[in-house]
Every structure is written in structure tokens, then in C-alpha cells.
Image (cartoon, grey):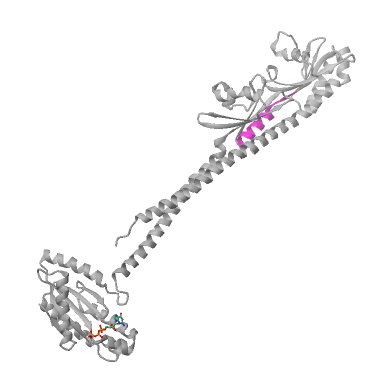
Amino acid sequence: MRFDYRIVFIITALLFTLSASLTLINYVESMDSTRKQLKNSSLPLTLDNIYTQIQKQIIEPNLIASVMSNDTFMKDWLSHEEDEVEKITQYLETITNKYNMFTAFLVSEKSQNYYTTDGFLEKISIKNPNNAWYFNFKNKPEKSEINIDYNEFMGNSLIMFINHKIYDDQSTMVGATGVGLKTSYINEMLKYFRIRYNFKVFFINDAGEILIAEQGIDKLEQLSNHPELKALIPDIINTETQLFEYTEEGESYLLTKKYVEELDLYLVVEAKVDNFTQSVKEAFYFNIVVSLLVTILVSIVVILYVRKIHTKLNELASNDTLTGLPNRRTFQGQLEHFMSLKARHQQALSLVFFDVDDFKRINDEQGHDVGDEVLVNIAKTLKSTIRHTDYVARWGGEEFIILLIDSQLEDATLIAEQLRKNIENNTQIFEHVKRKVTVSVGVTQVKENDDADSLFKRVDTALFQAKRVGKNSVTTVE
Ligand SMILES: Nc1nc2c(ncn2[C@@H]2O[C@H](COP(=O)(O)OP(=O)(O)OP(=O)(O)O)[C@@H](O)[C@H]2O)c(=O)[nH]1
């Protein structure tokens, strides 16, 4: 009976399918929950965090600019002392140093002069685009504004200006003052959020231009190279929607926005989804490999175990459990095999068939256990008497059979006689039964035209004759 590997393959396939399916379900769920967490928690939290930090940074300078615009010194200076530039320079310098601002400024409506901490800077003109901010501001109803602008006089860097109008007692606008601060802290903050949390943060104005972004981040500087993001910008500005999604070069991005009133800008936080699902993907590949290894391991254990059981079953099916000798069925198979070989190789084969004499008496008088012990010892004697190339079996009950390979009838008779003597003189059997146990033996040789039936019939006749002549003897039938 050959071991059928198909069942192992089926078990392996089922096991792997099961564990792979569970891993896949787990993966899909984890991906889904990571996306949900990104949408519902990480992105909005980061957005609020940045918003709060920016507001905190604006509050103090805004207050300073407001105090400056209401300062009586400022108002008096504008109406009576504008020729004393020293005084205002000192005032602006004091404010800048005291509050650690990048600059402080004043524009006089009467003289159109622009003063900074360095004194008189320039005469502003409506024709100069750099001065456009003042004329725009003047025409606005608001008393204050925040402008984020590059300033060529200030190292051409991005400066946040907090502008406040100055009014005289008749509520006429007499100028504008305020402070300027470098936005480098914003850049630091944007960098921090990118490195620490994998978020890209930027600010867009009403015109859809990205006004503040981390410097050196290609994507945001070259918005025209990113049509998918560019196409979203009108929606970011004009709709109430908070969350946006787009795909670029096969990568999925999520965006969230908030309007920052003080800056009149939209704060946008962007996340590349893959950055957040990477660990889930890695866990998925790892789990698949582990599942495969575990499946292989389980399959090996199953193969080893099933093979062991299979060998045991084979043994049980082909061997006699009491003596360990092959049983009748196995013997018949072997006999047919040797008979066909004989036809090819012209090899002499003989059959020896024997039966324990008066075995029933042993059982009846001394019990079955003693009877069993006798059979076991006869099997041992049998094995030690014949050659290892011969084939022996328990035929059934107290009958044994031997196929002697390459043996003529005369040799077989000699071996049968030897066997009979060995059993009769066996001391171990004697110890158990307390008397001699003998066997009657029939011998025959396989003939040219024999089949299994004719052969058995002949050897059975020989055994019968051996019994008839008084047992404990060997009889040969040609
Ligand atoms: N202890 C034991 N007895 C068995 C076993 N198989 C068969 N027997 C017994 O062997 C006995 C055989 O008895 P019989 O066929 O009458 O043969 P016998 O008593 O040996 O008589 P002869 O063959 O004429 O010498 C029966 O009592 C069976 O029950 C076995 O495995 N163990």
C-alpha cells in the first residue's frame, strides 16, 4: 500500500488558503483603519495644531502693532515733529529690540515717507509695486491686516508684516505702522511636520497661489508640474469641504484645509497615503511568509506522522500480530511473485507446511496464554532455522508455511526435518508447556505447471499424511 501524498497536498493547500485569507482580511482591515485614522484623526489634529501655533505666533506682534498705532507719541510725532527723524528711528529701534521683531516701520500719510529702524527708507509711490500694499491697505475698511511678502530691502526673505492704521482725533488716517517678522519659524514648523509626521503643509491665497511652503520642497514650488493638485485648489478655496483626495502617478494623497482669518490664507495639510500604510504592507508580507513557513512546517509534521501511521497500518495489514510473521494474505502475494520469477529464472522452489500437534490440548490444559507463547517460540525457531532469503508466514491458527527459495525437494525435506527437531527439542517451549511440543510437516516442490491452488493442495496432502502416520514427522509429496 503506497502512501498517498495527495491528502497532504490538500491539507497544505487548505491550511495555506486559510491562513492567507485571514492575513488578507487582516490586511484589508488594517489598511482601511489606517486610512480612516489618517482622515479622521491625524490630518485634522495636525491641522489644528499648526493653526494654533500660528495664531500663538501672531498674537504678540499684532498686539504690539496695535499699541504702536494708538501711541500718543506716534500721533504727536506725525502731526508736529516729522522733521525729527531721529526720534522715530529710536522709537522703532526700541520696539524691534524689546520685542525681538525683525523690523518695525511707520508710513506717514502726510509726507508719504517710509521709516524703519534705519531711519527714512524711501518715499512711497503708487507707481512702485513694492508700495502697493500701503495704498491697498489704505482703501480697505479694516483697521489692520497681515501681509506675507518678500521684501527686497530685507534680504529678499519672506516677511510677515502686521499693519495697523493710525488715526488722529478726527478719525482721519494719518499713517500706518506695525512690525515685520521673519517667517523662518513657520518654515521650521513645516519642516518639523514633514520629517516627524510625514505631512506636507502649505498655505494658499485666494488667487490659488502657494504663498508659504517649506523652502526647497520641489512639489510645492512647482505647482504647475502637479496638475492633479492644482485642479483641486479652486475646490479648496471655494468649497466647504474639509477633506480632499487625489492620485498622482499611482500614489494616493489626502488633503485637509482650514481658513486662517488673520492671514487670509488657507492652511493645507497633505499626506501621502502610502507613507502611512507602508508598515501595514510590510506586516502583510511578513505574515504571508510566516503563514507559508508555518504551513510547510505543519505539512512536514503531518507527512511524518501520517507516514508513521501508514507504515504501522501496513505492518498490521500484512503481518500477524502475535508472532510478527507475515500473514497468509502477504504470503500468497509473495508466492505468486516467486512462482512467476521461477518461470523466468528456472529456479527450484519448495513449500513446507506444518501444524503443531495436539495444540488444542495445550490450550485446553494450560490456557491460551501458554498456547500463544508456544506459537511465538515456534516462530522464533522457524526464523532461526531457515535462510534469510526464504519466505515464512503464519498460515493461520497453529499452521505455518515456508517457501524455500532455490531448494530442491531433497534439500527442503532436510530443512523440514531440521525444523521438526529444533521445535521438539526447544527448551523454552518445554519450560512453558512442561513437555515436548511437536509438529507435523508436509513438503513439496513447485512443479512446472503448478498454480497456487494445486501447490497448496499437494502440500496440504503431505501434511495430512504426516498427521496420519502418527504426527511429529515429515512427509513429502512429489
Ligand atoms: N493459543 C492460541 N490458540 C490458537 C490460536 N489460533 C488457533 N488456536 C487454537 O488452536 C487449536 C487447533 O486445534 P485443532 O485444529 O483441533 O488441531 P490440534 O489440536 O493441533 O490437533 P492436530 O492438528 O490434529 O494435531 C484450536 O483450539 C484453536 O482455537 C492462537 O493464536 N493462539
Nearer to me, 69 or 347: 347
Camera-nearest residue between 160 and 359: 359
- Residue in view at x 81 percent, y 9 percent: 111
Query: Where residue 162 sits in the image (x, y, percent)?
Result: 76, 22
- Residue under the image location 34 percent in, 87 percent down: 367
Stretch of the chain drawn in magenta: 180-197
Image location (x, y in percent) of residue 85: 82, 14
Mark yes or no: residue 163 visible.
no
Instruction: Decide: is 292 above or below 181.
Output: below
Give the residue at the far bottom of this rendering.
434
Q: Position of residue 125 (x, y in %)?
A: 74, 9
Q: Position of residue 89 (x, y in %)?
A: 81, 18
Quarter that holds the C terminus: bottom left
Count of all numbered marks drawn on residues in the image: 0
Residue under the image location 18 percent in, 67 percent down: 336
**Vertical arrangement, residue 248 with respect to residue 124, above or below:** below
Location of residue 100 with respect to 14 vertically, above or below: above
Q: Which of 151 and 336 is in front in this view?
A: 336
User: Is 282 included in the stretch rendered in magenta?
Assistant: no
Which is the main secondary structure of the residues drawn in magenta? Answer: helix
Locate the N terminus by quadrant: bottom left
Which image quarter: residue 78? top right
Evaluate whether residue 338 shows in this view. Answer: yes
Residue projecting furthest to the right: 169
Query: Is residue 20 found left or right of 431 in the rendered image?
Result: right
Residue 196 included in the magenta stretch of the image: yes
Residue 23, placed above or below residue 267 = below
Q: In which quarter of the image is ligand 1?
A: bottom left
- In the rendered structure, the answer to whether residue 224 lies left or right of residue 172 reads left
Instruction: Give the residue at the far top of this rendering.
Output: 127
